[in-house]
Amino acid sequence: MKKGILFLLAFFISVFLCVAQKIINNPKCGIYSEAITITKIELTPDATILTFTAKVSGNNWIAIDKKSYIQPVGDTTKLLVTKAVGAEIGKRIFAEKGKNKISYQLYFPKLGSTVSKIDFGEMTDNPWQIFDITIKEQPNLSKVPEKYLGNWISPDNGLWTFSLMDTLAILDSKIWKYKSINKTGRSLIILLKNENQEQQMVIKSDKEGFCQMGFSEKEFKNYTKDFSALTNFKRQDSKNFNLPVFNPGKVVYKGLIYGYTPRFKSTGLIKYMNQLTSQQETEVVKIEKDGSFNIELDLNYPQEISVGLPGLQERVFVEPGMNLFQLGNLRAPEYNSLFMGESADVNYGLRATKAIVPEQDELLSGISNMNQDEYINRVKEIKEEKKKILSEYEDNQTICRKALQIRSLDLEYSIAQNMLLYNQNLRTANYLENKDLDKSLQKPYIPKNFDLGKLTDLKNTPINNDYSFVSSEYFPLLRTLKYTNFDQLQWNYAYLILELKDSLEKQKIETTDKEKEALAFAKSVLSAPYEESQEKKLYGDYGETINQFTQKHRKEYLRIVFSFYDRNVSANLAKIFGVDNGLSLETSYLTDFLFKLNSSDFSLTDEDFKQIKNRIKIDYLKEVAIAEYYKNKARQEASSSPAPSVVKSPGDNIFDSIVTRFAGKVVFLDFWATWCSPCLQGIERMKPLKEELAGKDIVFVYITGPTSPEKTYNKMIPDIKGEHFRVNNEQWDYLNQKFKINGIPHYALVSKKGVIINPNMDHVNNEELKKILIEKLND
């Protein structure tokens, strides 16, 4: 009897606990910070417990803000964290060795019984945030029946065709609203509306996850929610890129961020490289309240762009003259995004073949114990492994021809570059092996014998392929060929400053005693075997002297540097690839010409223009040189004329609001952050210069964004003489676009009239900067 009572008691307790404690595994969320995910929520009578997994890498760490909170959606009450398990609030937390994840629990006060969704956040300036965390599933309030909601893929072409959501639909790369939804027999007739356009859909389903859809009741096609249909379809009819791939035009890129909320930031950034000018282009994207976005980009050739939108941080491939629609933040295991439009297929193909480009870990594994022959054989093995995988894709025809073209070239150029970077990769491996070791256990970097004659296979690399520009690996390879003299692999910098010394001596220009000492040391390292300690001495003990020396004679130094580039690329292309003309060489000529054209350090003449036209034989490259030359001339002529009336962008307005208060003064802009070590070093270095210029109409303006914690910022700025502005996320995005900020510190110069003289100043020493500022003050 007693046993029976105990059994019943245990049973009722377990039932009570199940009722009293609700567990939600992998809860649904809307937009959230990339670094963390919620893997479990426990609702107990006393608390709300959230289990987090945070991604970390290397020596990075995380810290739990003491004002972390949860907030019921639609309520203003913030429920603060009460305790943590598996981590200590306010302390740095590192991952265990060999792991890249940290798991912990945060406890919050219990939620009300009516709460269905919560937000998680931190009361700090750069918070982790997770929105619309589902606590209680709500009944489907959409007029669209549950079985039809979702993303539908066509088995007939292997592409995403339409989506039906609670309040919106996606079809033909457009976002539609529901005008009417009516049931007729087994079918659902949906009338969609997009501005002045209407579209009817007829849909029916007899099986979960499958449906038939048509635009009338007479013609239906089959669709599935199974994402495997994207990868199983044979794309035997797909086509290669059209030639020439260099074909400037507009890209219409638009889409929808699934689960977006206006409570998150309402702007994002798209960045891409103009590889010919070596300029990063930045565009601000405005996100509408429903999560939709739409932007046009001017591109010269098909390429990847870097998308940085809330919930959508990835690289996307776009093509001039074509459109792309992206549905992002799906959080599906297989796909975070779906694509529609003319560039959809190539994006699916590139995602499927991402592993074709060798990762750094693959290339560095075991390199410290390899000589050049062993390294070459290892890289060849990697190439053959990747080619085999690519051949399988080609045989199965599951990715399109364009993706195959891109990945084939990516592999060729990546392998070629890494064959050439044997010693540089050896240095990287040495750094990675040493970084976690005590200084006494660290091994010095010792370069190994490198013989270009062993790279005869590289002559088969398609370095002048007509499609080269579509590969993101092509331009890095060209830069390696340009920047490297393989006969003096370790001491290119020492070689250049000694060439500058020789040039100055011919011009009978004197050097100081400190410069003579530094140059003598540079000469000594060139004539001796490489030693890491000597390199550190050159860059450390003599670094500032050499930097001032090259800045003082900047124009002559740059002339020498570009002459060095010119010799390198010609010699390397001939020696390594067996070519003395064609796309690779002419692209290099063009990039150097465009750099000089847009740099205040060079004054190109009509003779220079004539020379570049003679050097470049490829029509589309020559057209770029001609167009850019005359554009530059027009800009120079316009700068001396009254500025035309233009519609100002948000970035212009933010800039104006900052600089107008300094009218009549030369403004030096410093974009920085409290956590940025090079920024703080630059600020410290300029302190004596600011003292020297005190009383003159020159003002130093420091601009930072919300990644600089407000308390730290307020603590720091009293010690930084100048004018200070801390802008919000959207303002930072627009300034980022205006000044093409690709990293901080970023410097810019503004005239006494409030006109930007230089949106991206070089990092020069105090003496050179003083000269520039005084010159602009006297203009």
Image (tube, rainbow, N blue to C red):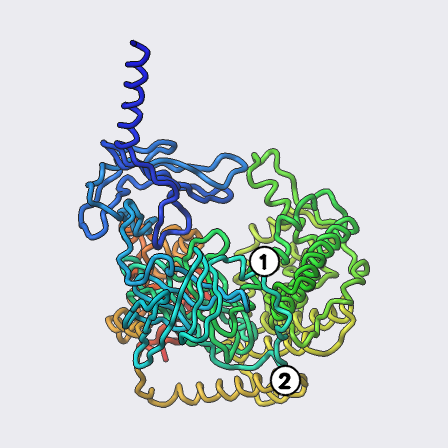
Where is residue 59 shown, x and y percent of the image? 49, 41
Where is residue 764 shown, x and y percent of the image? 47, 64
Left or right of 246 in this view: 642: left
Check disc 1 and report its element: helix, strand or loop. helix
Which residue position holds label 2? 612
Q: Earlier in the sequence, mark 2 or mark 1?
A: 1
In the image, what residue occupies the spot 63% across and 76% down?
587
Amino acid carrying label 2: it is Ile
Task: Examine the image and state in which quarter residue 194 appears.
Answer: bottom left
Where is residue 480 shown, x and y percent of the image? 65, 64
Measured Cα–Cα span from mark 2 to mark 1: 38 Å
Check disc 2 and report its element: helix, strand or loop. helix
Task: Examine the image and state in which quarter residue 521 appears.
Answer: bottom right
Which residue position holds label 1? 354
- Badge 2 vs badge 1, beta-carbon distance below 8 Å: no
In front: mark 2 or mark 1? 1
Is residue 734 in sight in this rendering?
Answer: no
